[in-house]
Each structure stands twice: as C-alpha cells, then as structure tokens.
Amino acid sequence: MNQDPFRTPTDAEIASAESKLGIIFHDDYRLFLKSGSDVANAIFEPAVILPGSGHLDIFEIAETAWNVMGLPRDLFPFIEDNGDYFCIAKTGEVVYWSHNGSANERWQNFSAWHKQVCVDRQ
C-alpha cells in the first residue's frame, strides 16, 4: 500500500515514529504533526515522519543531525535547512541550531516560533 507521506499521520504512526527515534515528542510537536505541519508562508519544509518523503525524512534528518552534525540529542530537529536546524527541546522551547555554532535564536514555545517564523515572516 503506497500512501501519501505528506498526509496527516495517525496517532499510531506518530507513536511508531517516536519508538523508532527513541524519543517522546513534545505535545506541541505532536499537535503540529496532527494539524498538517503547516509552516504557512515560511520558506522551510518540515520533516515528515511517514515513509516515502525523500529529503524530508525525519529519520534521516535526525540521524545526520545527531551523528554527523553534532546536534545534542536533547534537541529534536524538525526542520533542516542547509545543515542548520529548527529543533524542539524536551521543555517545548524551540531552538535554532546552526552548524556554524550556536545561533542563540530561541522561542519560548512552538506557538511563539510558528507565529514569528511561519506567519509573521513575509
């Protein structure tokens, strides 16, 4: 069965992705996935947890971020942009991590990040 990897994932598919990654998604990220991973007008493409998503495959993105780029494992990369990552921490804080060094861009929560980066940025 070849299903659309860009559709909204089910709870079981989200749980399967968590198991495969060895993490528990923050509730904000889970809500983001269930709302269609909308990044509005932003130039970024969010990672996809369903198979067949090509360069947006969350498992490949996380593997590269953690094991090649040196991203700390307490950050979960949900968007990759030329070796830089938007990540969600276990606390729900969203962090921009650059392969060139810490960028110090942080948002208190997913909602604040989404508003500034995805909605307000024109």
Image: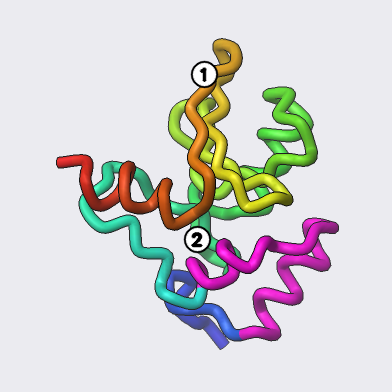
Q: Which residue is mark 2?
A: 53
Report the front residue among 1 and 73. 73
Q: Main secondary structure of the magenta part?
A: helix
Q: Is residue 27 magenta?
A: yes
- The residue positioned 74% from the left and 34% from the top of the image is 66
Counting residues from the start of the chain, the first of labels 2 and 1 encountered is 2
Return the x and y of residue 115 as percentages of the image width and height: 32, 51
Residue 34, disc: none
Position of residue 67 relative to residue 90, above or below, is: above
Return the x and y of residue 85 as percentages of the image width and height: 53, 34
Q: In the rendered structure, which segment of residues is drawn in magenta?
A: 11-33
Disc 1 on helix, strand or loop? Answer: strand
Report the front residue among 34 and 27. 27
Q: Residues within 10 Å of mark 1 (few under 14, many from 20)?
A: few
Report the front residue among 84 and 116. 116
User: Is there a contact, CB below 8 Å, between mark 2 and mark 1?
Assistant: no
Point out the residue furthest to the front here: 108
Q: Residues within 10 Å of mark 2 (few under 14, many from 20)?
A: some
Left/right of residue 111 with respect to residue 66 in the rendered view: left
Labels 2, 1: front one:
1
Point out the residue furthest to the top here: 100
What amino acid type is highlighted by mark number 1? Answer: Ala
Disc 2 on helix, strand or loop? Answer: loop
Q: Quadrant of residue 50?
A: bottom right
Q: Quadrant of residue 15?
A: bottom right
What amino acid type is highlighted by mark number 2? Answer: Ser
Q: Quadrant of the N terminus?
A: bottom right
Q: Which residue is mark 1?
A: 103
